[in-house]
Image: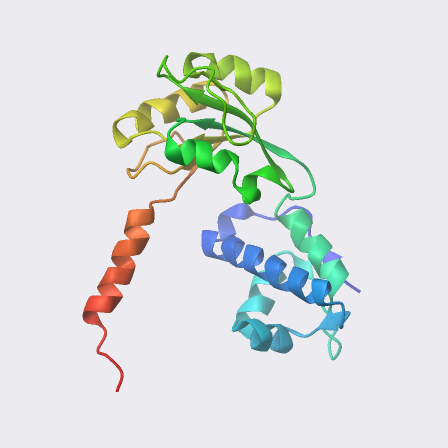
């Protein structure tokens, strides 16, 4: 019988573990969409999706005992457990600050517009952009209204899509407005006080990693 620990010490769980949970969730959903199996072992899950079975068991063990020895994991139960662990069983509201090409494109991104995430505001400090429509139907609003918008719309996550020079100031404003989670797309690191979690996504860094492997890996014969 599965036993899910609803409260865990998050300081013992790495970001890599959390990222892998998201991967496991997508794999489980693909199996459920196929409709041909109801249970799966960690070995079979690893084989189908090029994962590591020992790593799967270790990651899930942080949160409880989900499988049955000799049988495996019930797919529907496992999906529900991972959804609850990741907090995807409720809606999280986002505000985007920076209504340039990236900011407006993210409004229309399916990962934000569906499921557990909802963009409820797009802000910018450029007066010429205020009132412009975005692909999602939202109108660009004045960034000076950030504290009011966060409070009135129950926003939990701030998304930074400004030029690098403005990113730290925007992060400070988000923290001052009461946000404790920030997703930063600006190609620069921002600082935040303890208790505020900032995740930076720098696409150039990932491209440079690929460039490294292209440059330093001998071509196969």
Q: Is residue 166 above or below residue 81?
A: above
Rendered image quadrant of residue 127: top left
**Residue 96 relative to residue 207: left or right:** right
Front position in the image: 132 or 164: 132
- The answer to whether any part of residue 89 appears in the image is yes
Front position in the image: 204 or 73: 204
- Residue at position x 30%, y 37% in the image: 189
Front position in the image: 70 or 135: 135
In the picture, the quarter occupied by the N terminus is bottom right
**Residue 62 relative to residue 89: left or right:** left
- Residue at position x 60%, y 68% in the image: 57
Residue 16: x and y, percent? 46, 56
What colour-coding does the image apply? Answer: rainbow
- The answer to whether any part of residue 66 appears in the image is no
Q: State the residue lying farthest toward the left.
A: 215
Residue 156: x and y, percent? 56, 29
**Residue 58 relative to residue 170: left or right:** right
In the picture, the quarter occupied by the C terminus is bottom left
Residue 68: x and y, percent? 75, 72
Residue 125: x and y, percent? 37, 17
- Residue at position x 47%, y 12% in the image: 145
Front position in the image: 221 or 64: 221
Q: Is residue 88 above or below residue 178?
A: below
Q: Is residue 81 above or below residue 164?
A: below
**Residue 57 relative to residue 162: left or right:** right
Q: State the residue lying farthest toward the bottom.
A: 221
Q: Is residue 40 above or below residue 28?
A: below
How many labels sit on residues?
Answer: 0
């Amino acid at each position: 019988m599965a036993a899910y620990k609803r409260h865990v010490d998050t300081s013992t769980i790495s970001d890599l573990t959390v990222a892998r949970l998201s991967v496991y969730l997508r794999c489980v959903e693909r199996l459920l969409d196929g409709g041909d199996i109801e249970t799966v072992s960690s070995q079979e899950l690893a084989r189908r999706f090029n994962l590591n079975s020992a790593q799967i068991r270790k990651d899930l063990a942080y949160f409880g005992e989900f499988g049955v020895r000799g049988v495996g994991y019930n797919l529907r139960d496992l999906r529900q457990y991972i959804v609850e662990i990741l907090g995807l069983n409720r809606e999280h509201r986002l505000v985007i600050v920076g209504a340039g090409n990236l900011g407006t494109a993210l409004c229309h991104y399916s990962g934000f517009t569906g499921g557990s995430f909802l963009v409820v505001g797009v802000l910018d400090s450029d007066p010429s952009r205020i009132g412009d429509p975005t692909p999602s139907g939202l109108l660009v609003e004045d960034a000076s209204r950030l504290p009011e918008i966060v409070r009135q719309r129950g926003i939990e996550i701030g998304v930074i899509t400004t030029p690098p020079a403005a990113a730290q100031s925007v992060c400070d404003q988000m923290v001052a407005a009461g946000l404790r989670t920030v997703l930063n797309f600006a190609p620069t690191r921002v600082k935040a006080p303890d208790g505020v979690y900032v995740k930076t996504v720098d696409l150039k860094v990932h491209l440079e990693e690929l460039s490294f492997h292209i440059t330093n890996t001998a071509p196969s014969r």
